[in-house]
RNA sequence: GCAGGUGUCGCCAAGCGGUUAAGGCCCCGGUUUGUGGUACCGGUAUCCGGGGGUUCGAAUCCCCUCAUCUGCCCCA
């Protein structure tokens, strides 16, 4: 019985040609976020199921139908993380980071798991890059977080996106608004789609961003959350919008945007890109403020704000990358000499290849080796034939124009270093 | 969970009841063992996602199954 070489449904391998993009994105993220004072945190890829149920919220789609949950040998219920914030908050508390001078700023990157039907821009294992800032309650840090994200996208070469903004209120005003929604809509329940009737019970706010036109028809005259904020939330919101604009970002106020996770309070935002490469997906990242989550996990009251981007989706939007450095290729009648020279060149920082297709001790003929060099798009070929080896020399062939030059082996590395590394 | 599309060599792909299962790309070898990119020649699927069935005969028809893609829901 042969083993299937297909990866599990909804997962995929990141192959040699693609990993360049991943590395580019990761290194850019790292420098960008650290520059803004964010420190990397690495938390487990699975956690106690309870953490997500409580943290993300029982009524969310993520918890109610998308979790990868399993029991270990001691019958603990564990779940592959569907998002990064819950784990960060847990680690933040467990490590006592709340006792550090605020704000505590973290970033993370890694695979997340949601059991869904795969399609363009959506897989069961996907990757998020996120940041979390704990301990500051003013809108200034909301804005920092948004600006850092926006700048990061631009650094990646992604320019065509909008920032949608909304405020969801807090414990002081959201319950009242929720009831208001129920009151207004109770009589119209029969005109709504099945999903909305369900949302009516579980999470009325979610009704507002329903995509069904007949539902939207019913919501036309429904007041938005922004108009029903309590004084504190209102002040925060107005300042937020003002500050965001002052930083040169033109947010799109979207009173209908309700994020899918329960922990958000006040600020919610989403980065949206309309690009056919994303299929019908348009959200490339999102986040908001979650001022009650730390407390809910048993910590001291700690306001927090953060976001996460879908790395896989960002990668789909990356402009065509520049070509990587071209190697030097060592051709020799003596495989051992070829490897020794390649190693010498590599030590001074030159990307160097050689031929491995020979049988046993024998090198392939020069023609074959140079063919191989050509296939790898070598910039230069170093030829160490019997003649050169006898004289302690090396022939350098410029693959662009075919010109050749003989240098002594002792000068080879420094000569090529000059030509290639400048 | 629901609705459609697709599954023939590593990749693209012809074939639509009786073929040794085209072709192209890639790869390998040769013409050319001291020199590349072109050209020419040769090689590479006992097998058509898997399992049943119909038939004298199936990659081609039927059933089941698996995978994949696209969309709905929702999100990254």
Image (cartoon, rainbow, N blue to C red):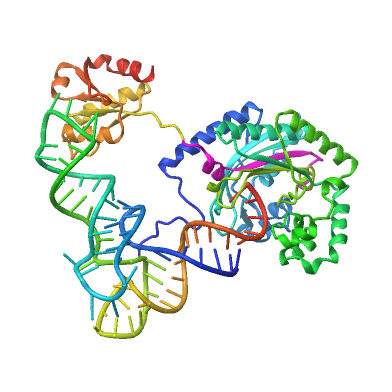
**Residue A402 colored in magenta in the image:** no
Quadrant in the rendering for residue A131: top right
List the single residue furthest toward the right: A231
- Confirm whether residue A26 shows in the render: yes
A120 sits left or right of A206 in the view: left
A374 sits left or right of B11 in the view: left
Q: From the viewer's perspective, is residue A295 above or below residue A401? A: below
Q: Split into 4 quadrants, where in the image is the N terminus of chain A?
A: bottom left
- Confirm whether residue A73 shows in the render: no
Point out residue A177 in the picture as x, y percentages from the top left corner: 86, 52
Quadrant in the rendering for residue A161: top right
Q: Split into 4 quadrants, where in the image is the C terminus of chain A?
A: top left
Stretch of the chain drawn in magenta: A297-320
Q: From the viewer's perspective, is residue A39 above or below residue A265? A: above
Point out residue A95 in the picture as x, y percentages from the top left corner: 69, 38
Q: From the viewer's perspective, is residue A86 above or below residue A243? A: below
Count the numbered circles shown. Answer: 0
A280 sits left or right of A365 in the view: right
Quadrant in the rendering for residue B3: bottom right
Point out residue A366 in the picture as x, y percentages from the top left corner: 17, 31
A263 sits left or right of B69 in the view: right
Point out residue A276 in the picture as x, y percentages from the top left corner: 55, 48
**Residue A306 colored in magenta in the image:** yes
Q: A35 or A68, which lies in front?
A: A35
Q: From the viewer's perspective, is residue A336 above or below residue A3? A: above
């Amino acid at each position: 019985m042969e083993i299937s070489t297909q990866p599990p449904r909804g997962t995929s391998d990141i192959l040699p040609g693609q990993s360049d993009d991943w590395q580019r994105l990761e290194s850019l993220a790292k420098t960008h976020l650290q520059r803004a004072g964010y420190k990397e945190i690495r938390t487990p890829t699975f956690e106690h199921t309870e953490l997500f149920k409580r943290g993300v919220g029982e009524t969310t789609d993520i918890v109610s139908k998308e979790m990868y949950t399993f029991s270990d040998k001691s019958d603990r219920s564990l779940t592959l993380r569907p998002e990064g914030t819950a784990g960060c908050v847990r680690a933040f508390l467990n490590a006592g980071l709340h006792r550090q001078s605020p704000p505590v700023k973290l970033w993370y990157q890694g695979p997340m798991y949601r059991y869904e039907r795969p399609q363009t821009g959506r897989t069961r294992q996907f990757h998020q890059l996120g940041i979390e800032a704990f301990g500051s309650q003013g809108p200034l840090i909301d804005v920092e977080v948004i600006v850092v994200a926006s700048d990061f996208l631009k650094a990646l070469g992604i320019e065509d996106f909008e920032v949608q903004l909304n405020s969801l209120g807090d414990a002081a005003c959201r319950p009242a608004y929720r009831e208001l929604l129920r009151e207004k809509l109770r009589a119209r329940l029969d005109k709504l789609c099945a999903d909305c009737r369900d949302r009516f019970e579980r999470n009325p706010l979610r009704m507002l961003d329903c995509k069904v036109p007949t539902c939207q028809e019913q919501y036309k005259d429904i007041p938005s959350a922004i108009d029903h904020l309590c004084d504190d939330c209102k002040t925060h919101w107005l300042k937020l919008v003002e500050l965001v604009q002052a930083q040169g970002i033109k947010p799109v106020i979207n009173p209908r945007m309700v994020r899918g996770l329960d922990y958000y309070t006040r600020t919610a935002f989403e980065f949206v890109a309309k690009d056919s490469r994303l299929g019908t997906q348009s959200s490339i990242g999102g986040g908001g403020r979650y001022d009650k989550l730390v407390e809910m996990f048993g910590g001291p009251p700690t306001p927090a704000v953060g976001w996460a981007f879908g790395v896989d989706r960002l990668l789909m939007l990356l402009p065509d990358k520049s070509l990587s450095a071209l190697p030097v290729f060592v051709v020799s009648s003596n495989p051992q000499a070829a490897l020794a020279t390649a190693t010498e060149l590599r030590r001074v920082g030159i990307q160097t290849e050689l031929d491995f297709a020979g049988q046993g001790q024998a090198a392939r003929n020069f023609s074959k080796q140079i063919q191989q060099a050509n296939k790898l798009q070598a910039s230069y070929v170093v030829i160490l034939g019997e003649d050169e080896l006898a004289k302690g020399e090396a022939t350098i062939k410029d693959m662009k124009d075919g010109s050749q030059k003989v240098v002594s082996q002792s000068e080879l590395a420094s000569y090529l270093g000059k030509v290639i590394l400048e």
